[in-house]
Structure formats: C-alpha cells, structure tokens
Image (cartoon, rainbow, N blue to C red):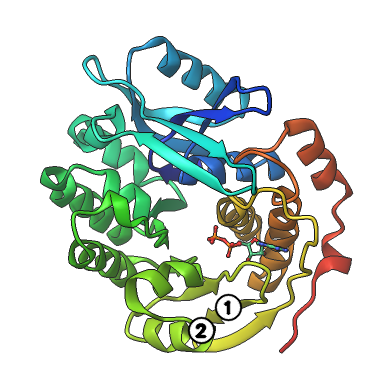
Amino acid sequence: MGKIVFFGECMVELSQQEDGLLKQSFAGDVFNSAVYLARTFTQVDVSLMTAVGSDSYSEKMLQYFADESIGCEFVYSSKTKSAGLYAIKTDDAGERSFTYWRSDSAAREIMSHVAPADVGRLSKQKMFFFSGISLAVIKPSERDKFWHMVETLRQVGVTLVFDPNYRARLWQSEQEAKQQIERALNICQIALPGIDDFSKLYGIESTDDLVEFLTNFDIEEVVIKNGSQNVVSVQRGTIQECAVVPVLNVVDTTSAGDGFNGVYLGARLQGKTCEEAISFASSAAGFVVQRKGAIVEKESYDSFVTNFDLKSASSSIS
Ligand code: ADP
C-alpha cells in the first residue's frame, strides 16, 4: 500500500525540437512531482490518482507510470474520453509558449470513477497531495464529491498537502479560483506555494506579505518558493529562511516547483527536518532547471541523487 498519493492530470506532451519535429513525452504538475519523489526516494511508495483514456497514448502513459515506479491503484480508465494533450514551442529568443487540448480530457471526470472503497484505501495513506491545477481540472459539478473525499481523509489522519499553482486560463473567473484555493488552504496541513501564484491572483509580491496572508489559515507547515530567491518556511509560527544557490545556466524552469515539491515531501516522509528537506529539494530543483523538459533524463538525475550530500548542503540563514 502506498504512502503518498498525488492527485491530478498527466498529459501527453509534444515539444518542438530544433529540426521542427515534435518529441512526445508525458507531464503534468503533480505527476512531475510524483516522478521526482519516486526517483529520489526509491523506498517511498508513490501513487498517482488520475483518469486516463483507452487510447494508445493513454496505454503508453500507463507503461510510463510503471517505468517510473508510480503506483496505479488509483488510476482509472475512461471508455469515452482521451488523455489531455499540450504542445510546447520555443521561439528564437528562447521564450516558450504552450497550447493545450485538455478541456474534455479523461482527467476532468476523475471524481465520477471514485467509489467509497477507493476512499477507504486512500485513508490508509500517509499523505495526499493536490494542487490548484488539480482543482481547476475537476469538473465543477464533481467538486463537492472531491471536497467530501478530502474532508474524510483529513478526519482519518491523512496529511493533506497543497500547492496553489494558479493557472488563470483553467478557471472561469478569479473569484472561482480564489474560492477553491482558499478552501484548500483552509483544510491542508502542509502548503507549498510559489510567490508568483499569489502575485497574479492576490497582488502579493513579497514573501513577508505572503507569510502574513497565510496567517489567515491554520496551516502547520508552509514552504514558500520564489525562483532563485531564498526559500522561506513557517512551521507552527517559526519563520526560517533557507539559502538557494542561484543557478547561472537556467535552461528550462517548467518543473522547478514540481521537482521541489516531490523531493521535499519525500524527504519529510523519510523523517528529514523541514530545513533538511528544503535543502535537498532546492538542490534538486536547481539541477532540474539546468536541463530541458519537465522530467529530466533519468540517468543524469539518478547520478545527481547518488552524489548529493545532504549534510553539507543544509544551510539555514536564520
Ligand atoms: P514554481 O514552479 O513553483 O514557480 P519556482 O520558480 O519558485 O517554482 O522554483 C522552485 C524552486 O526551484 C525554488 O525554490 C528554487 O529552490 C529552485 N530554483 C528555481 N529557479 C532557480 C534558479 N534560477 N537557481 C537556483 N534554484 C532555482
């Protein structure tokens, strides 16, 4: 039985290569986190909770989950819908643009597959992770069922983890996004926000202001990511700043926050302190941004993990 379940959508990814051809892979925010966790901490059981289609890309996706040691006991297959798809194009100046075909994907209907017995199996997990993107993807008519499930998990002692990950185009309005995100902040015990999400939605630009805003919610552990700036954590009221070593050769920041989340949660599940977990997570994210793609090549990532020295990397400023 798994220890952590990541709830969200995995999509088929098409990225344009220099020769104009499209390279096909798979990605999605919570899925990326699951992969980085599973690769970094092979002893932790990691599962994905999602819905895929019955098309050949969905079948390939299931194989990919297995190849990355991601448990599929909460992966449902829709008979009528297909996996979501997105394409990434990089222009001559290095600017990336994304085009999505996900509005009618199988993952939108995930909650229609969830039976009471599944909630019973989820209740045996240690952690349940979801993001603002996971919330936006759930069909509005099925959101009550999702919140009911999450409330049940909280009551039986599963730790709820939330990353607000705000993507304006996935919501009908800012008001709808705020209502759902605040509901999540009200119920989660661990929050892993990035400053940019709150800057877009609430006009909050600084870590201090975000710390202040989050005091409105009763969250045990908050870890605030801010690109190459230092990470700030708040654990039961104690504020700490952890150094980030800025990377000069940034190639692709697509999954910096996702990689950070996966490694952070894996380290916490393995009994590391918040500070140690931040140190490992920001080093891993710093490695990821120097390589192309949401999920970097396995061999090079594995060698990063093997060579990582947690003790010497740990660095708290205050
Ligand atoms: P998000 O995807 O949530 O916006 P961020 O861009 O804030 O994520 O990055 C997440 C983490 O990745 C940061 O907290 C930091 O540890 C690491 N990171 C991101 N950009 C850099 C960088 N330029 N140099 C070093 N580390 C970075």
Tell me if 266 is positioned left or right of 282 in this view. left
Given the current orientation, which residue lies at the most extreme top position?
56
Q: Is residue 4 visible?
A: no
Label 2 sits on a secondary structure element that is loop
Q: CA distance from mark 2 to mark 1?
A: 14 Å
Task: Name the residue tied to disc 2.
Answer: 206
Give residue 6's quadrant in the image: top left
The residue that appears at 49% across and 83% down in the rendered structure is 236
Residue 256 position (above or below residue 79): below
Q: Nearer the viewer, residue 13 or 65?
A: 13
Percent across and percent down for residue 289 are 70, 51
Q: Is residue 154 visible?
A: yes
The C terminus lies in quadrant: bottom right
Given the current orientation, which residue lies at the most extreme front position?
92
Percent across and percent down for residue 113 are 22, 29
Tell me if 143 is positioned left or right of 275 in this view. left
Percent across and percent down for residue 227 are 62, 67
Q: Amino acid at mark 2?
A: Ser
The residue that appears at 64% across and 49% down in the rendered structure is 93
Give residue 164's quadrant in the image: bottom left
Q: For mark 2, does the 10 Å Cα neighbourhood hold few (<14), some (14 to 19), or many (20 or more) residues?
A: some
Q: Amino acid at mark 1?
A: Ser
Asked if disc 2 and disc 1 are in contact, CB closer than 8 Å, the reply is no
Tell me if 301 is positioned left or right of 207 in this view. right
Task: Name the residue tied to disc 1.
Answer: 233
Residue 196 position (above or below residue 262): below
Given the current orientation, which residue lies at the most extreme left position?
141
Residue 116 position (above or below residue 285): above
> Can you tell which mark lies on residue 133?
none
Label 1 sits on a secondary structure element that is strand
**Ligand 1: image quarter:** bottom right
